[in-house]
Image: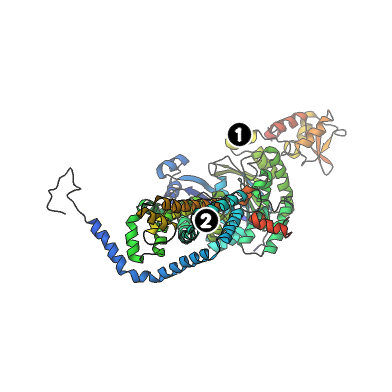
């Protein structure tokens, strides 16, 4: 089943979720004549949670879904392990349509294939850290020795050794969420669902946990669906990002694509405040050498600082500070493009440079 | 419809007789004719009550007292243990018969509470999970709590006969509701996100109930058990009207003879029993961690013994 690594591990096809008693009617009406959220609410007393969401997550990829509260992102993530049943559409986990699973198979899938981390931790207050972490294996009926060993491994992975016999309320918020993470990875699932895991933490702890999560993630290569309302976090963590608004996935792309080419006003507003320093590479803002020489005549690039196309703006700033000259971008030792100080500043501001627009 | 009175639109009630009292009397007849069916259940219940009664009375009073003090110490800590000890000494010295009568009453209360627990807990869980069931059982519980005991005393006696078993049954009717209500409340009060997490990690409904919901609802459920015990004790005098022995019977007999002194002995005995049982069960409701230790076996006499045996850190 896992042979085909190209196959998407998570695949959502046209997932709709409408809450309310008359959801089926409402869906039909929406399909017939485009109703807005408010019309559906007034006519059918239903709330549209997710609107025709389709996306794929490849093996080992971290896919972030970013949206404000009420945008339906938490609803969407709960479809992946069928905590919520879709009104329409299908969800495939490793090619298996999970809406066709029996309750028993579904429980096996949840316990063995999918680990989930919750915004409010949702640890069991009457169980110790170890018992919390071992929960998914306990309900599968694994023997105590095996599940304790696995749970201890997960606890060590999040640096909580020594705390395993404490109760959740004896731990700080950050530590509690590490327990949540340990619980999610204890059964070594293929998929991690992270529902705003770090949102309830203060900024410093959040940063620490993001770093710890990214280190863990680089090591474990788990397919991850990561929900957040914080675009900075999505950009830091995600390989790809989906922006969600009113239940619709507005744009899906790499962080760079989203920041440089926002699909609409809404996304543009979001990315306006995002620092481009680490996101945008030299290749994106450089002026091709030919264009530059046409404009300025032949130049001697001998003493100019050199950079590669994949260097970030941050690196370019460091180079640029040390010299008066523009930066020359070289591929395989040959100059390909020039970045003037103006172009660099415009790049930092997020504006494409003039020659780029002309071309 | 009674014909002898003329129908008055402003006072329709006095001229119409639906015959509810007569048809309800049919229940009595039905009860008498169905006595045989109830006999096997009755004998099982009787064995239970008599067994507990004999057991409690067979233990020498001082040993029993020490046992209760140890239980109180384990369940609720040292201060409660001292209180329980003093109370039980007071009970013993009330009158030469008081101890034996108290043990008989305790046996009735314990049997009623055990049965309440087995009936009330499932009902409460069901009510906590199912809104329709909760709504439909609520008026029944209201009725059980408010209807005067004398109303169902007669049908129960007709059905079961006088004695301990009917005493326990009338006690259950009155004492069951708080356990059902508080169990339902406890189950409903469990943090839904913890239940969701249990679901997300593959627990089945049974596991969610026994590993998450009931443990988290335990303090509330124990508050229900506490209330059930208190209400059971308050039924002791009424139960003695259908020939249940014990402290209640003392009060009833004293009342018949206008013997205030004897009534006080019986009444105080009931109050002392109530205080002792209340403090012990309230202690169980608090988790050991509220009292500064992690597991129940680390505190109280068990903890002491384990420490002396060198098995506790």
Question: Does dot 1 land on a helix, a strand or a loop?
Answer: helix
Q: Nearer the viewer, mark 1 or mark 2?
A: 2
Mark drawn on residue A304: none
Mark drawn on residue A269: 1
For disc 2, the neighbor class at 10 Å (few under 14, some 14 to 19, many from 20) is some
Q: Identify the residue at the far right of this view.
A: A302
Give the camera-side residue of A184 and B144. B144
Q: Which residue is mark 2?
A: B92
Give the camera-side residue of B173 and A314. B173
Name the image quarter holding the C terminus of chain B.
Answer: bottom right
- Give the side of residue A72 with respect to residue A172, left or right: left
Q: Quadrant of residue A288?
A: top right
Name the image quarter holding the N terminus of chain B.
Answer: bottom left
**Does A208 sit above or below residue A103?**
above
- Give the side of residue A277 with respect to residue A193, left or right: right
Residue at 21% across, 55% down: B18
């Amino acid at each position: 089943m896992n042979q085909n690594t190209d196959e998407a591990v998570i695949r959502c096809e046209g997932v709709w979720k409408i809450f309310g008693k008359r959801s089926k009617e409402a869906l039909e009406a929406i399909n017939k004549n485009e109703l807005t959220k408010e019309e559906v609410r007034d006519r059918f007393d239903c709330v549209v949670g997710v609107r025709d969401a389709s996306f794929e997550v490849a093996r080992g990829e971290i896919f972030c879904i970013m949206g404000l509260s009420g945008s339906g992102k938490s609803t969407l993530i709960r479809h992946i392990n069928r905590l919520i049943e879709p009104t329409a559409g299908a969800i495939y986990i490793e090619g298996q349509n999970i809406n066709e699973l029996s309750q028993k198979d579904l429980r096996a899938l949840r316990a063995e294939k999918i680990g989930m981390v919750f915004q409010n931790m949702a640890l069991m207050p009457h169980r110790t850290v170890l018992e919390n972490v071992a929960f998914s294996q306990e309900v599968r009926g694994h023997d105590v020795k095996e599940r304790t060993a696995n749970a201890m491994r997960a606890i060590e992975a999040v640096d909580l050794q020594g705390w395993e016999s404490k109760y959740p309320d004896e731990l700080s918020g950050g530590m509690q969420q590490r327990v949540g993470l340990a619980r999610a990875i204890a059964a070594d699932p293929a998929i991690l669902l992270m529902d705003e895991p770090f949102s309830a933490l203060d900024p410093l702890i959040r940063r620490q946990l993001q770093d710890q999560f990214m280190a863990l993630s680089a090591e474990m290569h788990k397919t991850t669906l990561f929900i957040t309302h914080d675009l900075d976090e999505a950009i830091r963590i995600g390989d790809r990002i989906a922006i969600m608004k009113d239940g619709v996935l507005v744009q899906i792309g790499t962080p760079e694509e989203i920041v440089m080419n926002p699909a609409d006003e809404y996304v543009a507003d979001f990315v306006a405040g995002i620092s481009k320093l680490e996101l945008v590479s030299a290749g994106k803002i450089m002026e091709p050498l030919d264009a530059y020489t046409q404009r300025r005549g032949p130049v001697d690039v001998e003493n100019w600082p050199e950079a590669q196309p994949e260097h970030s703006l941050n690196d370019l700033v460091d180079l640029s500070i040390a010299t008066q000259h523009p930066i020359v971008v070289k591929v395989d030792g040959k100059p390909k493009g020039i970045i003037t100080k103006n172009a660099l500043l415009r790049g930092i501001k997020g504006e494409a440079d003039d020659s780029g627009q002309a071309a | 419809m009674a014909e002898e009175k003329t129908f008055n639109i402003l006072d329709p009630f006095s001229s119409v007789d639906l015959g509810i009292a007569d048809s309800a009397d049919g229940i009595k007849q039905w009860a008498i004719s169905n006595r045989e069916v109830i006999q096997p259940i009755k004998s099982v219940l009787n064995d239970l009550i008599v067994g507990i009664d004999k057991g409690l009375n067979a233990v020498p009073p001082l040993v029993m007292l020490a046992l209760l003090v140890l239980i109180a110490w384990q369940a609720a800590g040292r201060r409660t243990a001292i209180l329980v000890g003093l109370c039980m000494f007071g009970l013993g010295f009330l009158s030469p018969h008081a101890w034996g009568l108290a043990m008989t009453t305790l046996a009735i209360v314990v049997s009623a509470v055990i049965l309440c627990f087995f009936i009330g807990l499932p009902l409460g869980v069901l009510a906590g999970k199912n809104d329709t069931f909760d709504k439909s059982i609520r008026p029944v519980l209201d009725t059980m709590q408010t209807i005067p005991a004398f109303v169902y005393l007669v049908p129960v006696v007709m059905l079961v006969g006088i004695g301990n078993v009917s005493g326990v049954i009338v006690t259950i009717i009155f004492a069951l509701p708080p356990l059902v209500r508080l169990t339902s409340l406890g189950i409903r009060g469990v943090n839904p996100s913890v239940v969701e997490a249990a679901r997300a990690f593959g627990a089945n409904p049974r596991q969610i109930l026994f590993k998450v919901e009931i443990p988290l609802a335990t303090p509330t459920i124990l508050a229900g058990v506490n209330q059930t015990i208190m209400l059971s004790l308050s039924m002791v005098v009424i139960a003695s009207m259908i020939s249940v022995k014990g402290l209640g019977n003392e009060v009833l007999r004293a009342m018949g003879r206008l013997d205030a002194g004897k009534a006080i002995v019986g009444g105080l005995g009931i109050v002392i029993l109530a205080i002792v049982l209340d403090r012990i069960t309230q202690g169980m409701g608090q988790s050991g961690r509220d009292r500064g230790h992690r597991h129940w076996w680390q505190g109280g006499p068990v903890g002491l013994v384990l420490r002396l045996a060198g098995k506790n850190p």
